[in-house]
Image (tube, coloured by chain):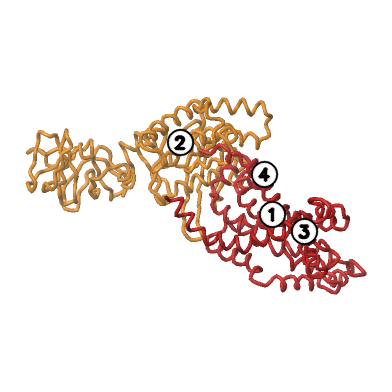
Chain colours: A orange, B red
Amino acid sequence: MAYMTLKDIDVRYDKKKQVLKGLDLEVKEGELVSLLGPSGCGKTTTLRVVAGFIEPESGVFSLDGEDLTKVPVHKRNFGIVFQSYALFPHLSVYDNVAFGLKMRKLDKGQIEQKVKNILEICGLSEFEKRFPQQMSGGQRQRVALARALVIEPKLLLLDEPLSNLDAKLRINMRMEIKRIQKKLGITTLFVTHDQEECFSISDKVAVMNQGVIEQFDTPENIYQRPKTEFVARFIGFENFLSLKKEGNVYKTEAGAVFTVETVKDGDFVAGTIRPEDIRIAGEKEDHNVLSGTVGVRTFLGKSYQYEVLTAEGKFLVSRPAEEVYEEGSTIRLYLPESKLILVNK
Amino acid sequence: MKKRSAFVMIIPGLVILAVCLFLPLLRVLIPSLHTGEYPLSAYVTFFQDEYYRKIFVRTVKVACLTTGFCMVLGVPTAYFISRCSKKWRGILLSVSIFPMMTNSVIRSFAWINILGSNGLINRLLITAGIVEKPLKLLYTDFAIIIGSVYLFLPLMIVTVAGVMENIGDDMMEAALSLGADRIRAFMKVIFPMSLPGIIVGGILVFTGTLTAYTTPQLLGGNKNMVLSTFIYQRAMTVGDWDGAAVISLIMIVVTLAVIKGFNSLAARLDKRGGDHA
């Protein structure tokens, strides 16, 4: 049963540029869902629709069965962590975290108890008297998180919260966010353009492109079975060949025959494969084969990576370091049907 | 080395200030401390006189109310301007400074036309049948305050808008997301963050109003004198230069006291001031 639902959301800026095109998304209670995509794909806009900063032109946003599309931001009770953290510089850490509770007119004792509790969960107990500008990036990040969580929000929204931290801190913080999110069991939307960050933290990932969700799935499925060429490219596939369905097999334009494990709907698709899954074809292999010329060779320690120029374009191939092919030589590549993934173009 | 070269650079300005401002000022003010039977007796006499005291109170009242009105009108306006797109911000700021481009005599005459017994407001009120006889609007404290607010509001708007421009939209959004409605978010976040600008604007408006001459002269008339018009009257009409010096020093002290007051208020409200990292 879906807890949070976005249905057929349209957003346009300045009446012209359409940013979200009939976007649908369903999130279960307690899940951490990432919105992943390149800049300009509409992921932050989606988050802002959920937060209430943008009212969609059409479509419905509902939470727990309640239509919230027209409910103003301050009545939604969502915790938001901004990319800039947006801590109030004139307030101490304690007062920053207590802000939301004061707006809810809780009595002083309750506020103190809740603030101290969340500061402890976020590892900030000793900093309550500090001001934001006296703290490091990672500490500010945690204050922002504590401030968003202390109001016991129905939804936690994170807008690229880690992009201002250095690499090492980023890894620590994302584990921290995941730990706190699981501990409190809070449904979370996480916006990011970093796929590693997103895969490591999310229960599910929505890969976005030009205002629509291309694929909404578990990180494992997205990594192993991308559905569209865009998703495949975004998560790092680089070898693509155009295929046309003919009966039970696929053919390239040049006529080479390819078989796959599962046939896909549609006559024109793309096949893709990771560099390490490509083998060298033996004498007996007569299909799933591409021949090409060896181009640039890069030594990667355990293996060599070759650029192979084929009739279908450039292919990256990884081979063990013991096997060496010279630049300019001709080789036949074997793309095993178990490893060849079909994606929509 | 750095300090010394900086010092050399302020010498010309310092010399001009010393020769043209501090020396004449001291020459006028020091004797005023010794006139009369005992030291400071001129000042004691000033505050013992009911008429003088009334002028003093009126001056401070007009300056305080003007500052207050400028804050109430200017701060929301400045916030609005600071949230506009860059293009609109430029246009709106120019429009708000526009009144400053006319001479203050002309601006005060405009108000005489509006407030006078035969002026715009009174004619409207009489035509509408709200009053029978024209109200006395001109030559009152109220007229001075209106004129001064009109005169100094641009200063407040420009100063505060400059500070507010640097407050990101995310501050408002964060406050909203934490359950504050727009007004509370403004009062609890935007307002305290803009205090430095509001304080500077307040000082500019207060000192400006306190020392303004044309506006109170034209809109207050001779019956509603303030310290600045009173100085002129003492010195030029009566020829009592010592009396004028006494009032001048009182004005200087009031100005300094108010600046000090504003600053310590700012320091109290902005706790960051003390233990900055």
Question: Helix, strand or loop at disc 1?
Answer: helix
Question: Helix, strand or loop at disc 2?
Answer: loop
Q: Chain letter of disc 1?
A: B
The residue wearing badge 1 is: B71
Q: Is residue A328 visible?
A: yes
On the rendered structure, is B194 left or right of B133?
Answer: left
Q: Which mark is residue B265?
A: 4
Q: Which mark is residue A152?
A: none
Distance between mark 1 and mark 2 Cα atoms = 36 Å
User: Considering only order in the chain, which callout, 1 or 3, is on the residue closer to the N terminus?
Assistant: 1
Tell me whether circle 4 and circle 3 mark residues in contact (CB < 8 Å).
no
Q: Position of residue A96 (x, y in %)?
A: 58, 36
- Among the 4 quarters of the image, the one containing residue A115: top right
Q: Nearer the viewer, mark 2 or mark 3?
A: 3
Q: Nearer the viewer, mark 4 or mark 1?
A: 4
Distance between mark 4 and mark 1 Cα atoms = 15 Å
Tell me whether circle 3 and circle 1 mark residues in contact (CB < 8 Å).
no
Q: Chain letter of disc 2?
A: A
| Residue type of the residue flagged with mark 4 | Leu
Q: Is residue A158 above or below residue A345?
A: above
Circle 1 crowding by C-alpha within 10 Å: few under 14, some 14–19, many from 20: many
| Residue type of the residue flagged with mark 3 | Ile
Residue appearing at x 45%, y 37% in the figure: A137
Q: Chain letter of disc 4?
A: B
